[in-house]
Image (tube, rainbow, N blue to C red):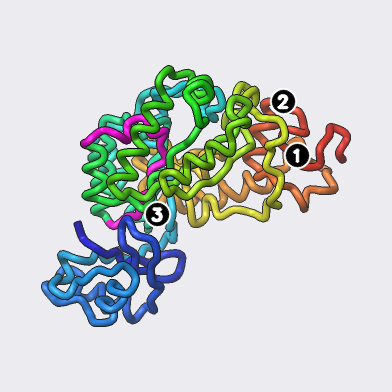
Amino acid sequence: MRQLIASPYNGTFLIARPGSKGGMRIPRALYEELASTAESSSPLPPWLLDHARAAWKVDLTASVMRDAVVVRPETGLGYGRATYEINKGCNFNCEHCYLAERKFEGLPWPDKVRLLHLLRDAGVLWLQFTGGEPLIDRDFVGAYTLAHRSGMLIEILTNGSRLHRPEMIGLLRDLPPHKVTVSLYGATPDSFDALTRKPGAFKLVEKGLVAAHAAGIALELALIITRHNAHELDDMRALADRFGAVRTEYGSISPTYTGTPEPLAAQAPGFLDKTSIFKGCPAGHTFFHVDPHGLATMCKVGRENPIDLLAEGLNGLLRLPGIADAQMLRTGGCGGCQLSGTCRVCRPLAKAYQEAKAPLNTYCQHGSEETP
């Protein structure tokens, strides 16, 4: 494993270390210095050695450039982040899932390789593997390894049920991710298994968290608050603290991205997130989503007019900003609202709520059907 990544990112240049927090923004001149010796046996420059010691307590004095540093080339696209929904299949059957169907299907391995190379060449530095459940995909280990060795900082968004397996812990110890984000659906087997509709789910996830924590893998817990577990929220927080994990709480349940209402039944009263005004989003401009078949869209919710990356290549992404802007401009059922300037819901998600015929107060912070 090469120790450092030097990469363009949204008009700047960064030095990062897989599996470690912190980084360094550098001027173009220093990036070009690294690029000029990237595949050579030259020693690392003194300024980089000093930073590695200070930021990560790593001594790379004996290392040479080609063995220690991945230097990512500049691209003309400027996409710094992407999510890859490697498969929609899942071994849980969560009541609140935003996927209308969870079919276990996707690209064959040669096409996954082509797709990951396209993501690399689009400039993607931060890559999130998601699903469905990514760890159950037959090609996950190979895809993760390829992305990691291509110089991407990786987040895995997982239900945690396969995290305990020795081959998975070994992979993540040898090729550290930026973080592994595990969805937490309760603090007890009763609540957890009720939401996931999977007997034994809680014990599997707890086993995975124990193994990952012991291996020193960076963990984050996504606390999913629903009618099944809202009464256990303090215990869910304590569980995150037990594993030294960063935690983020999610209280708003959305319809499926295709606009069907079934997940809304899991909403816990009083936990709608209406705190942040929606001020736009870089989706489609500096970020994009790819589904299991290689179709690129602005995000996991706004999936209109997908671009077939395998058929069109990187040139297809040139159309994505316009597709995203069209979805962001649409107001749908909110047309004429005098309070749209303080809306908390992104446009594609609002469309999904409207298509699901969700009550206005389940997504609009203004509270009632009578709101203008």
**For mark 1, what is the residue?**
364
Q: Is residue 6 above or below residue 237?
A: below
**For mark 3, what is the residue?**
126
Residue 234 lies left or right of residue 12; in this view the side is right
**Amino acid at pointer 1:** Cys
**For mark 2, what is the residue?**
357
Q: Residues within 10 Å of mark 1 (few under 14, many from 20)?
A: many
| Viewer-proximal residue among 29 and 141 | 141
What residue is shown at x 38% (from left), y 45% (from top)?
A: 180
Q: Position of residue 215 (x, y in %)?
A: 28, 46
**Amino acid at pointer 3:** Trp
Give the Cα distance between marks 3 and 2. 35 Å
Image quarter hosting the N terminus = bottom left
In primary-sequence order, the first of circles 1 and 3 is 3
Q: Based on the displayed image, in which of its 4 quarters is residue 51 positioned?
A: bottom left
Q: Residues within 10 Å of mark 2 (few under 14, many from 20)?
A: few
Q: Position of residue 255 (x, y in %)?
A: 62, 29
Image quarter hosting the C terminus = top right
The image shows a total of numbered marks equal to 3
Give the Cα distance between marks 1 and 3. 31 Å
Q: Is residue 169 above or below residue 359?
A: below
